[in-house]
Amino acid sequence: MQNEIINILKKEEKFSDKTIEEIREVELNDFSDIIKEVGKQETEYLNRNEILDGLNTKTIGKELYLFKEVMSTNTVAKFLSENDVNNGTVIISEKQSGAKGRLGKSWESPLGGIWLSLVVKPNVDHSKIPMITLATGVAVVKTLERIGIENAEIKWPNDVMINDKKVCGILTEAITKFNSIESVIIGVGIDANFDVNVLSKELQEGTTTLDIELGHRVNENEIIRFFLEEFERIGILFEEGGFERILKEWRKYSYSIGKIVEVREPFSKSYDGYVLGISREGALVVEKIDGTLEKVISGECIIKN
């Protein structure tokens, strides 16, 4: 985390190299106020006021920090979550230089995308964490509907697709203490306005952006505001125990149900199966070739048809 903090301060170009070296000797937790202050400064590409003006939420986004560049918004969110931030705090960066997705995969995050993390403090146990990822996916799809995209789908467990290409990824991480959940960090990346050719070659073919799908550039500030509103709506439903309603919405938008997939689970042999649906716990229900049913809680499902 110290390297992340140093990186943020260097990007601000307000500190000499000598000062940066002296900062390395400071107690890590003493940085929280500095990071919050930097996160309130104006940035070049995104506009804090445009995000917050008209934001119709009670909790989500009321505490918001915006950066020019960080290694990972999830890393900053985890640090701040341990240093007195409110439920619903949002960390946004114009780009990320070292983000990671699920299973440690690189998360390329160039300028022109929407890269943010939320700090939420839900009163739930570990078994409901997968549901948070599913609920976030629903919030993203509903956000895209508000800008005119009617064909977005959710690929279990954490991707949003348009026309068989990925447009959004979600990464959920629980912060625990003494077997209880202190907070949950939800990272969301939406490919908005950038040329996919800036991505690694292996990602280009399977990636799309909102401007490609709509045929024009989109307003990232507006989309962030829409997403925070949709996330709060579904978050209230989550807190009230409306899991069945969330699952109903997820099934409606599912990209995975009805497809043949290759299931890759940690420490297990991969296998092919047919996706029947999703369980009440958020697990993918897959029928294997021999007719047996499996509930997939974690891992990866590669679409084969």
Image: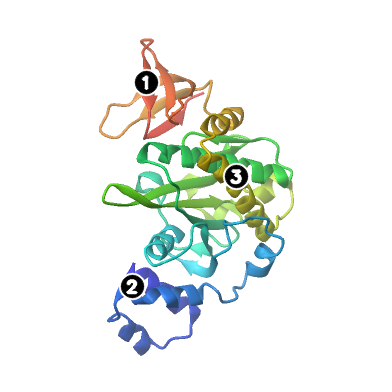
Disc 1 or 3, which lies upstream in sequence?
3
Residue 109 in view, yes or no: no
In the picture of the structure, the residue carrying the numbered disc 3 is 140
Measure how far apart labels 1 and 3 are at the Cα level: 28 Å
In the displayed structure, 4 sits above or below 161; it is below
Q: Pointer 2: residues within 10 angstroms few (<14), some, or many (20+)?
A: few
In the picture of the structure, the residue carrying the numbered disc 2 is 29
Tell me, for residue 65, which label it has, or none: none
Type of amino acid at the residue the image marks with label 2: Asn
Residue at position x 51%, y 42% from top?
239
| Residue 289 x %, y % | 38, 13
* 52 relative position to 259: left or right: right
Q: Quadrant of residue 124?
A: top left
| Number of marks | 3
The local secondary structure at tag 3 comes to helix
Q: Quadrant of residue 266?
A: top left
Measure how far apart labels 3 and 2 are at the Cα level: 33 Å
The extreme top residue here reads 291
The local secondary structure at tag 2 comes to helix
Q: Nearer the viewer, mark 3 or mark 2?
A: 2
Residue at position x 55%, y 35% from top?
154
Type of amino acid at the residue the image marks with label 1: Glu
* 76 relative position to 114: left or right: left
